[in-house]
Image (cartoon, rainbow, N blue to C red):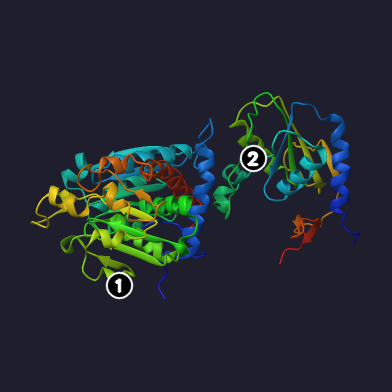
Amino acid sequence: MRRNPQLNKNGELQHLLSIEGLPREVLERVLATADSFIGVTEREVKKVPLLRGKSVFNLFFEPSTRTRTTFEIAAKRLSADVINLNIAASSQSKGESLLDTVANLSAMQADIFVVRHGSSGAPFLIAQHVKPHEHVVNAGDGRHAHPTQGLLDLYTLRHYKKDFTRLTVAIVGDVLHSRVARSLIHGLTTLGTPEVRVIGPQTLIPTGVEALGVHVYRNMREGLKGCDAVVMLRLQNERMRGALLPSAQEFFKHYGLTADKLALAAPDAIVMHPGPMNRGVEIDSSVADGPHSVILPQVTFGIAVRMAVMSMVAGASA
Amino acid sequence: MTALPDAEQLCLQLADAIRPQLTPNTAMIGLYTGGVWLAERLHDLLGIAEPLGTLDIAFYRDDYHQQGLARDPKRSKIPFSIEGRDLLLVDDVLFTGRTVRAAMNELFDYGRPARILLAVLADRGGRQLPICAQYCGARVEVPAGARLRLRRTEEGRLSLQLEHAT
């Protein structure tokens, strides 16, 4: 059997490319490690010396503010040197290939590549070509995966709800274009979540998604009943081809999360959103800022989760 | 080989040795995992008012680049300001001194204590750094390659055990 390209011969995480295919123990180890980093982020001095002398290259072929910034903060809190490359404005526009860009950065002594790319699979390609001491972390590739977002969602769920094996989780909205949804679904099923629902219009739910072990609901009120957590997704206008939706207003009417729809979920349900959110499109302001919302804690947890991932991969030999 | 000393007995002796030198400024910090068990016991025996601090030095180890990140790090918790305090650092076994160095590095990221003293249940020698314990339950001869560690039963009883390399 071919080994999972993310794991070394001891089964340790050496690249993080996708939650799909990662064993339960590895996911649990990331969550446990992130939990101890939370302690660090609550201190006066928020740095530990683990990655001192290491270089983290943030390779963002697609724009991102939150993810890039939280990776940068996480790397700095591990004492790494961080180099941010805005590729859209650099060599690729002059015709350099992806692997040539990476080879050049490797010659500058990189240790970790954090990669965001519009094409699914780009981080896999890079991971296949890096040197043994170099590590790749996928920060979102096309429609495929966004594993650190999935992991921080899992961390958030565990923080508020403790036990995955008793949860009902709904993922609502533009599942079709969402790498976040895919990563989260794989993580939830691996950790034994009994009921994962996806809710959205037919045009925004990928065909065959049931094969991932989820239940599909077209009617949001039906789908929200009894949910312990509601994960709202951003309507990804920039990835839409053709007319999948009549209008944003129409979408909000059927699939926007409002207080009266949320009332159908469990009384202590939490509301999550990977951001950036469109108020009045997928979520109402009163919910986004309301008592059920854990959207801002998600951002804080994301730093600890990324610290965990980077310190785990950088410590795993090839 | 001589039998290992009784850990329960050593706890009481250690508490007796520490007691006369406690001040209102003393706070106690245990190192995971064995050091926390011992510290919980000493904290109780000595009736220290300040809650116990616990430290996991996983993020400060000097062998990270050889060994990678420890498997199950715990969250370090120091529920008081260490600024200007007399800290009593507690660990089960003192060996190379590298754990204590890492712990001191971590502590200084919380503040500047007035002084740090070290209490250990057993000292097995073999120091690789200039570190010594101010309070030590017993000196124990341990064959090279073997590991001396503290165990705790479900009932909370402490014992020292020798583990031979396989």
Q: Identify whether A306 is placed above or below A127.
A: above
Nearest the eye: A70 or A210: A210
Residue designated by label 2: B102
Residue at 49% over, 65% down: A9
Is there any visible trace of residue A258 in the rendered image? yes
Question: Within 10 Å of the Cα at label 2, are there few (<14), some (14-19), or many (20+) other Cα atoms?
Answer: some
Identify the secondary structure beneath mark 2: helix
Residue designated by label 1: A211
Question: Within 10 Å of the Cα at label 1, are there few (<14), some (14-19), or many (20+) other Cα atoms?
Answer: few
Question: Could you tell me the amino acid type at mark 1?
Answer: Ala
**x and y percent of residue A211 in the render?**
30, 72
Nearest the eye: B11 or A139: B11
**x and y percent of residue B21 in the render?**
84, 29
| Quadrant of the image occupied by residue A182 | bottom left
Is B21 displayed left or right of A61 in the figure?
Answer: right
**x and y percent of residue B93 in the render?**
77, 48
Q: Chain of mark 2?
A: B
| Quadrant of the image occupied by residue A80 | top left
Q: Identify whether B153 is placed above or below B88.
A: below
Q: Quadrant of the N terminus of chain B?
A: bottom right
Q: Identify whether A244 is placed above or below A272.
A: below
Is there any visible trace of residue A120 in the rendered image? no
Identify the secondary structure beneath mark 1: helix
Question: Could you tell me the amino acid type at mark 2?
Answer: Ala
